[in-house]
Image (cartoon, rainbow, N blue to C red):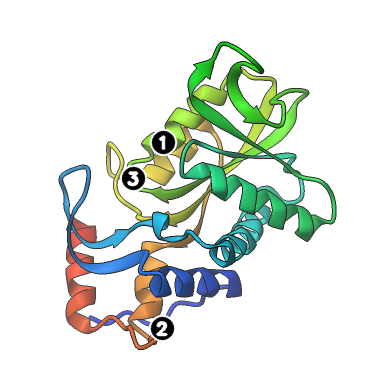
Amino acid sequence: MLRPMSTLHPHQIRFLELLVRREALRFGDFTLKSGRRSPYFINTGCFHSADDLAVIGACYAPAIQAVAGDAVDIVFGPAYKGIPLALAASQAYAQQLGRPVHWCFDRKEVKDHGDGGGFVGAPLADGASVVIVDDVLTAGTAVRESLTKLAGLPIRVVGVVVSVDRQERGQGQDSAAQEIAREFAVPVQAIITIDEAVAHLSSQAIDGRRLGPDDVARIEAYRRT
């Protein structure tokens, strides 16, 4: 059954258009890292131009504000894909607020010489308000690793913002996003969810690309499973 058109905010439509035009969101038959067969695949690695980065930042900024208001001091991005996201998001969020906003990312391996440490960028100290940005939320493994790594530091993690929430189940009946929010007592926000993307693309085309009833039925069957 064809879904009704969703009501998306302008930044969500702009991000969905970027996903489709860069073929970062594709529909078909894909085998995921988990071994699952999925009718859609999301790869934010397709965003690699300066123009893409500007759009991404402009889409993350209102999502950050929705989850944490004007209170964020540092935007944290987990290595590696989270690094450009943190840079783009902090710049756009700072421009939106009209005040300085800092960025930080972690190292895969702690550096024991030179500047040393496990993080690069703004100091994670002094009770700073931090929001984590990441790309696609599936099982939530990377987000959990970031939250665990930041636990115990003298900061406050006030939210998690991802580009796309696949809305996949976690370890139980709830989605991974719901489990993370409950487990770590932190709000989780997506620029767009897969349900929102499907609802929009089944109602109107982006550059001639539109989902038909068969496409929607396959996606709904996968989501039920």
Q: Which residue is mark 2?
A: 206
Q: In front: mark 2 or mark 3? A: 2
Mark 2 and 3 residues: CB-CB less than 8 Å, in contact? no
Q: Name the residue type under label 1.
A: Ala
Total labels drawn: 3
Q: Is residue 143 left or right of residue 186?
A: left
Residue marked by disc 3: 174
Q: Quadrant of the C terminus?
A: bottom left
Q: Which element type, helix, strand or loop, lies under badge 1?
A: helix
Q: Residue 202 placed where, x, y %?
A: 33, 81
Q: Earlier in the sequence, mark 1 or mark 3?
A: 1
At 52% across and 75% down in the image, what residue appears? 13
- Residue 11 at what x, y percent from top left? 59, 70
Q: CA distance from mark 1 to mark 2?
A: 30 Å
Quarter containing the N terminus: bottom left
**Residue at 54% across / 34% down in the picture?**
185
Horizontal arrangement in the rendering, residue 188 relative to residue 158 (left or right) = left
Seen as rendered, the residue at the extreme top is: 112
Tag 2, which secondary structure? loop
Judging depth in this view, the residue of 14 and 138 nearest the camera is 14
Mark 1 or mark 3: which is in front? Answer: 1
The answer to which image quadrant residue 115 occupies is: top right
Which comes before the other along the chain, label 1 or label 2?
1
Q: Mark 3 or mark 2, which is nearer the start of the sequence?
A: 3
**In this rendering, position of residue 121 left or right of residue 83:** right
Amino acid type assigned to the residue bearing label 3 in the image:
Asp
Q: Which image quarter: residue 176? A: top left
Give the residue at x 41% y 70%.
22
> What is the crowding at mark 1: few (fewer than 14 residues within 10 Å), some, or many (at least 20)?
some
Find residue 56 and report its image quarter: bottom right
Residue that badge 1 annotates: 142
